[in-house]
Image: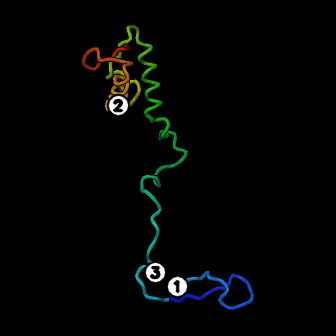
């Protein structure tokens, strides 16, 4: 390795302070040609962007799911919704339904009516 001063301009030698680092055959292991930069996660490479079966992040977002859950709840005749039915209709795991109901219970919009049933307050 060698450092060489590169003048920035002006008339005299050593006028500039900027230097260029030249890396040659220094034998350091971090300069190995066999090293490659990772391309990213393997899962992302397997997805095709135009696949109709894959849902986008927005389609699976908790915000959108909550809107759909509230629509189901508002359409129920007595304001009571079965969580098993909601999970089935919305095609999500029951855990995601619990995520929604925990927040809605916390802000006092719904209450637990009985096991697996919630109601508007």
Residue projecting furthest to the top:
78
Q: Quadrant of residue 101?
A: top left
Residue pictured at 45% horizontal, 65% vertical: 38
- Residue 118 x %, y %: 32, 17
Contact between marks 1 and 3 (CB within 8 A): the answer is yes
Residue pictured at 43% horizontal, 18% vertical: 72
Compared to residue 5, the image places residue 120 above or below, namely above
Q: Which residue is mark 3?
A: 31
Residue projecting furthest to the bottom:
13
Say few, some or many: other residues with alpha carbon within 10 Å of mark 2 (under 14 / 14 to 19 / 20 or more): few
Residue 23 badge: 1
Q: Which residue is mark 2?
A: 99
Residue pictured at 47% horizontal, 62% vertical: 39
Compared to residue 43, the image places residue 75 above or below, namely above
Q: Rounded to the nearest whole Å, what is the CA distance between mark 2 and mark 3?
A: 49 Å
Quadrant containing the C terminus is top left
Q: Rounded to the nearest whole Å, what is the CA distance between mark 1 and mark 3?
A: 9 Å
């Amino acid at each position: 390795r060698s450092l060489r001063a590169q003048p920035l301009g002006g008339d005299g030698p050593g006028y500039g302070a900027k230097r260029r680092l030249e890396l040659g055959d220094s034998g350091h292991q971090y300069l190995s040609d066999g090293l490659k930069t990772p391309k990213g996660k393997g899962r992302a490479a397997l997805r095709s962007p135009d696949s109709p079966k894959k849902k986008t992040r927005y389609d699976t977002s908790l915000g959108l799911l909550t809107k759909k859950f509230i629509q189901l709840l508002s359409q129920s005749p007595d304001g009571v919704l079965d969580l098993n039915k909601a999970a089935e209709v919305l095609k999500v795991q029951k855990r995601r339904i619990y995520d929604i109901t925990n927040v809605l219970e916390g802000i006092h919009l719904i209450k637990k009516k009985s096991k697996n049933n919630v109601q508007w307050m």
